[in-house]
Amino acid sequence: MKGTVQITVPCGVVSKTILEGIGRLQRESVIGIRGTIKKMPKAPRGVEIIPEELRILNIAKPLPFEMRGRARLDIRLDERTLDLRRPESRAIFRIRHATLNAIRSFLLKEGYMEIQTPKIIASATEGGAALFPIIYYGREAFLAQSPQLYKEQLASVYEKVFEIGPVFRAEEFHTTRHLCEITSVDIEEAFVKAEDVMRVLESMIAFVIEIIKTKCDYELLILKRRLEIPRLPFPRFTYDDILEELRREDIHITWGEDLPTPALRKLGRLHKDYYFITDWPTQSKPFYMLPRGDNPRICDAFDLMHGWIEIASGGTRIHTRKLLEKRIKEQGLTPESFTFHLKVFDYGMPPHAGWGLGLERLLMALTGKKNIREVIFFPRDPRRLKP
Ligand code: ATP
Ligand code: MG
């Protein structure tokens, strides 16, 4: 048995030692109780325990916030371990646990092999700005912002690979959807295109929701969250469709630019559920995305959105060395720093595609939490390095 149970201490029935002991307790103290179970229809589980023996294992000090009330998020995060004992926080992390399990079992069932790639790396993958530099035996190195290059290399060996692991982003701004350390779910697959991995992604999301609905019904109840299994396929809009839609709402975006936050907010009001944005301008995406043969200004990349929040990014990758080198230069990076990666393309690199999904972003969609810090045990952001 697990959960909460009511303990009632009627004066005159339980011993004086127990009464005194109970009197010394503070909220969240740790105790052991032996006693008689009595029916009590009004109690939370329909029973209560009348103690015959009390063991005080550890008395808590007065708490910094009211466990059942509302406390400011930053105060709760300062005392995160205590905060996690609140039913709502506990429910979120049960869902996180179930989500990770569901993702892993889905990808294994689909034939992907789990890989681990280095988190200390020598060069940028998603552009230089968001990197954390570190000193590696006197040399400059970085914390990995994505497993991108390594998962592509391993897809050339195992064809279908996935990784669930940390990635690091030196974000400059303090937002409700950015952290500096996240868990990224990545897949990469040989001999397929963007559309194929989009289908894997949307089926995985639907599978996860189905599992959460059945396995976490209690947690969803605590969070007052209703989940619907989304219909497949998810709607697909091109970048140009989206720009046009925004223009009608009087938001004007220069072709080629990424979508700024106000535009995303507007999109979230127009599209509440999951949808894809495809056919992105090549200049707005990382160097490894495959430009279209018929129109190289556009690449075969997609984002998966939920309302205004980006959940995943992916696409068909470049698989020839010459084009990859050209794109690295065009993005203002130096091919020399990618020699270790480029030479793999000389030994027979199959065409391939994949995506990366931010676990915490998906959890925001699943739990309905508006601040990403709610869905990670110990958030790291530009202002927070502790606890
Ligand atoms: P955004 O535009 O929202 O900052 P991005 O396009 O820079 O994200 P990608 O490089 O595409 O991010 O990373 C893949 C996925 O990782 C994103 O779709 C998102 O789910 C997640 N992600 C990226 N950066 C962060 C971050 N700083 N905090 C939380 N999740 C992130
Ligand atoms: Mg992206």
Image (cartoon, grey):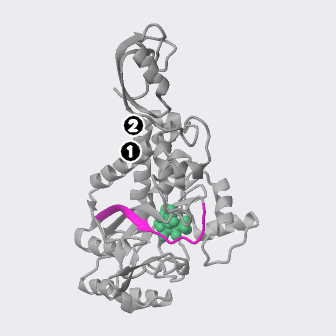
* Residue name at image x 39 percent, y 41 percent: 211
Sequence order check, earlier mark of 1 and 2: 1
Query: The magenta stretch spans which residues?
Result: 161-175
Judge: label 1 CB < 8 Å from ligand 1.
Answer: no
Q: Is mark 1 on a helix, strand or loop?
A: helix
Q: Is residue 270 left or right of residue 102?
A: right
Q: Is residue 116 above or below residue 102?
A: below
Q: Position of residue 160 (x, y in %)?
A: 28, 64
Verify whether residue 385 appears in magenta: no
Q: In which quadrant of the rendered view does residue 145 lie?
A: bottom left
- Secondary structure found at label 2: helix
Please determine whether, in this image, residue 4 is positioned above or below residue 174: above
| The N terminus, quarter of image | top left
The answer to which image quadrant residue 112 occupies is: bottom left
Between the residue at mark 1 and the residue at mark 2, the CA separation in whole angstroms equals 8 Å
- In-image side of 125 versus 113 (left or right): right
Q: Which amino acid does label 1 sit on?
A: Ala
Image point (45%, 17%), residue name: 19
Q: Where is residue 157 in the image (x, y as percent from the top left)?
A: 23, 72
Q: Is residue 162 magenta?
A: yes
Q: Which residue lies furthest to the right in this view?
A: 250
- Rendered location of residue 321, percent (x, y): 34, 87
Give the image location of residue 131, x and y in percent.
47, 76
Contact (Cβ within 8 Å) of mark 1 with mark 2: yes
Q: Which residue occupies 41% across, 67% down?
A: 167
- Numbered badge on residue 98: 1
The foreground one among 191 and 187 is 187
Residue toward you, 170 or 257: 170
Vertical placement of residue 234 versus 45, above or below: below
Q: Mark 2 points at which residue?
A: 215
Question: Would residue 305 appear left or right of 255 to someone viewing this image?
Answer: left
